[in-house]
């Protein structure tokens, strides 16, 4: 497997580029609901995976909103294509090789033992946002039960088009769950519990956004003005 090789300098440089060039140019806004708490143990953060943007949005959160020293599991193929992700905390997994999976899980457990945060996409690959079931892999349960002190968060990313040219992104952070709450349950049972938890969160998030009930979200990032913004400004000036 490929281990992370974090670089503070590179992370700062990429964060500036990611924020000011990529995200602000591509999104109307990014908003968030919920929060991470200060933890004295390892933190496992599970996120749904429906977009190419998920990795860069996750990195943005680790630099601005998430209070932990974060690492993220990434496909070996993707990390070989974009090796610079090692410098922001990415490490590889190859789901087609059982030995690689074992090595990755051992490495991830070491990070959790050392009170780091490990982000992972338990679906294993990008899936359409509305696809159900989410089909979690069992690796998430393996890490969720690795240590009774591990705290587990569920993060859902919901991308939507509303009244602007560019999409909005709404992020929801769940209340934490402690690993010891999964005592005496099999790995498959824990996998099902985690998948059910994320499915419920994502469905409720979708329904509220569909009703444009987003008052409980806090704005994280406002995008650059788009063509639609200029049209709205001109239309308003003439009315």
Image (cartoon, rainbow, N blue to C red):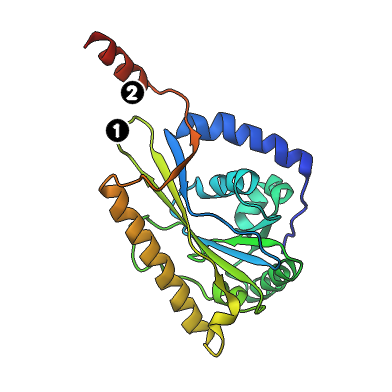
Mark 1: which secondary structure? loop
Q: What residue is at 33 percent from the left and 16 percent from the top?
A: 233
Residue 202 — which label? none
Residue shown at the point (66%, 63%) measured from the top left: 39
Image height check: is 28 above or below 181?
above
Q: Residue at x 24, y 9 (%)?
A: 238
Measured along the vertical axis of the image, is residue 11 above or below residue 48? Answer: above
- The numbered mark, 1 or 2, whose residue comes first in the sequence reads 1
Residue at 38% over, 37% down: 167
Q: Which residue is mark 2?
A: 228
Residue 191 at x, y = what percent?
49, 77
Q: Residue furthest left?
A: 239
Against 72, residue 181 (above or below) is below
Residue linked to disc 1: 163
Query: Camera-side residue: 97 or 68?
Result: 68
- Locate residue 12, reporting x and y percent: 71, 38
Q: Disc 2 on helix, strand or loop?
A: helix
Percent coordinates x, y for residue 64 in the rendering:
62, 43
**Quarter of the picture holding the C terminus:** top left
Q: Mark 2 Cα within 10 Å, few/some/many (few <14, many 20+)?
A: few
Name the residue furthest top: 238
Question: Quick one: 33 or 120, which is closer to the camera?
Answer: 33
Do residues under tags 1 and 2 come within 8 Å of each other at their CB atoms? yes
Q: Position of residue 97 (x, y in %)?
A: 62, 72
């Amino acid at each position: 497997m490929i281990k992370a090789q974090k670089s503070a300098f590179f992370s700062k440089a990429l964060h500036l580029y990611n924020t000011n060039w990529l995200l602000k140019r591509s999104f109307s806004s990014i908003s968030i609901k919920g929060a991470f708490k200060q933890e004295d143990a390892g933190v496992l953060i599970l996120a749904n995976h429906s977009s190419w943007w998920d990795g860069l949005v996750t990195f943005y959160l680790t630099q601005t909103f998430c209070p932990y020293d974060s690492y993220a599991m990434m496909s070996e193929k993707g990390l070989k294509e974009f090796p610079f992700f090692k410098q922001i905390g990415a490490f590889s997994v190859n789901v087609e090789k059982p030995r690689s999976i074992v090595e990755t899980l051992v490495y991830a457990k070491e990070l959790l033992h050392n009170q780091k945060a490990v982000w992972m996409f338990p679906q294993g690959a990008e899936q359409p946002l509305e696809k159900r079931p989410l089909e979690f892999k069992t690796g998430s349960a393996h890490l969720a039960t690795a240590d009774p002190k591990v705290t587990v968060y569920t993060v859902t990313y919901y991308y939507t088009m509303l009244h602007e040219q560019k999409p909005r992104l709404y992020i929801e952070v769940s209340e934490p769950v402690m690993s010891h709450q999964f005592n005496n349950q099999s790995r498959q049972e824990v996998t099902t519990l985690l998948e059910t938890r994320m499915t419920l969160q994502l469905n409720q998030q979708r329904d509220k956004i569909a009703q444009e009930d987003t008052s409980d979200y806090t704005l994280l990032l406002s995008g650059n003005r788009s063509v639609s913004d200029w049209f709205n400004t001109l239309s308003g000036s003439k009315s």
